Amino acid sequence: MMHVDNIITGVFSEHHFSMAVRESQKLANVFKAKVRPVHVIETLGFNPFYPRETEESRLEALDKFKDDVDHLYNKHGASHVEEPVVQIGRIHNELVRVANEHDNSLIVVGRHNEGMMHKFVTTEAERIIAHASTPVWVHPHRHISRLPQTIVCALDFSENCKRAAEVAVMVAKSCAAQLYFVHVIPESTGYVDLEGQLNVYYPQEDVEREEVNTKVSEVMADMMASLDLEGLCYAEKILSGGAADGVKRLCDEVDAELLVMGSSSHSSIERLFMGSTMRWLLNNYEEDVLLVP
């Protein structure tokens, strides 16, 4: 079963550091993992406060941010927290690079999606997810959450979905949480969304739809048989409708505190442009989301 040894935490301000460390500390206590805070100074772009002229100014900023992060880290007295790291570069590239340097990493970042801009502009969390080869836990910065007691895992029966299911089981066991596995059968002909092996073609005729339901149930049973579910409280749900709407509907119905999904990374194009279902859920589901590549 997968385990987490290192939690890579993005740190961007005193408020977000306080929240990020507390969220990461919570997970570190559960997984017996080390928290590795990472602050990234972006040197490119149009923000006039970013150092980008000389090596001297970059080093001065580096020292200042190290002092700030060290001060905040000591101020909160968090245990399991390793020496803070300050990188210069693009946020998503540097967080992913640090995660790749450590075994069994989990990236924890906040989600900034208030207002309308996130509907049109790719968020930092989306960039991290698109480039990460490790799971990414996205937490809404609006509040401090408790450990999830109810978890929903969305299934499309693809390969990375199987990995997501394994991670969902690991988290549910670690948190003693109730776990729901859900697959949504689209209602429209030719509907393609989550890209699983069953999401290529769904007929509308009643007889054929019954066959699809039967096939989905069989594949769901096979996946359940491949997971280590001993001692876990779980349930299986097969719904109909739009994929994103169906998953969100179940999350609301069971008051889920964590949604686990597989992230698409089959090609360089997909790594740049996330699927509409995943992006909609990431930006509209108000609780924690865990994306597994």
Image: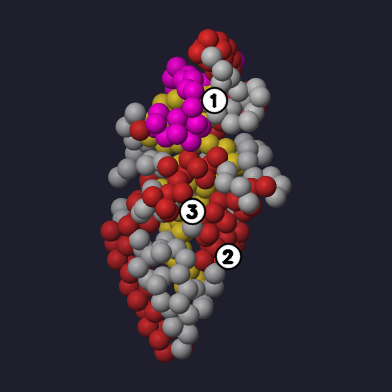
Q: Nearer the viewer, mark 3 or mark 1?
A: 1
Which residue is label 1 attached to?
43
- The single residue placed furthest to the right in the displayed view is 115
Vertical comparison of 280 with 148: above or below = below
Asked which secondary structure carries label 1, the reply is loop
* Front label number (2 vs 1): 1
Neighbours of disc 1 within 10 Å: few (<14), some (14-19), many (20+) = some
Which is more N-terminal, label 3 or label 2? Answer: 2
Q: Position of residue 96 (x, y in %)?
A: 42, 34
- Distance in Å between CA atoms under marks 2 and 1: 39 Å
Q: As displayed, is residue 141 above or below residue 18?
A: below
Specify whether residue 91 is painted magenta: yes
Query: Which residue is drawn at the image coordinates 37% and 42% (left, top)?
Result: 133
Q: Which mark is residue 274?
A: 3
The nearer-to-camera label among 2 and 3 is: 3
Bounds of the magenta span? 74-99
Name the kind of residue labelled 3 in the image.
Met
Q: What SS does tag 3 mark?
A: loop
Classify 10 Å Cα crowding around label 3: few (below 14), some (14-19), many (20 and above).
some
Provide the residue designation for mark 2: 245
Residue 197 vertical position relative to residue 97 in the rendered view, above or below: below
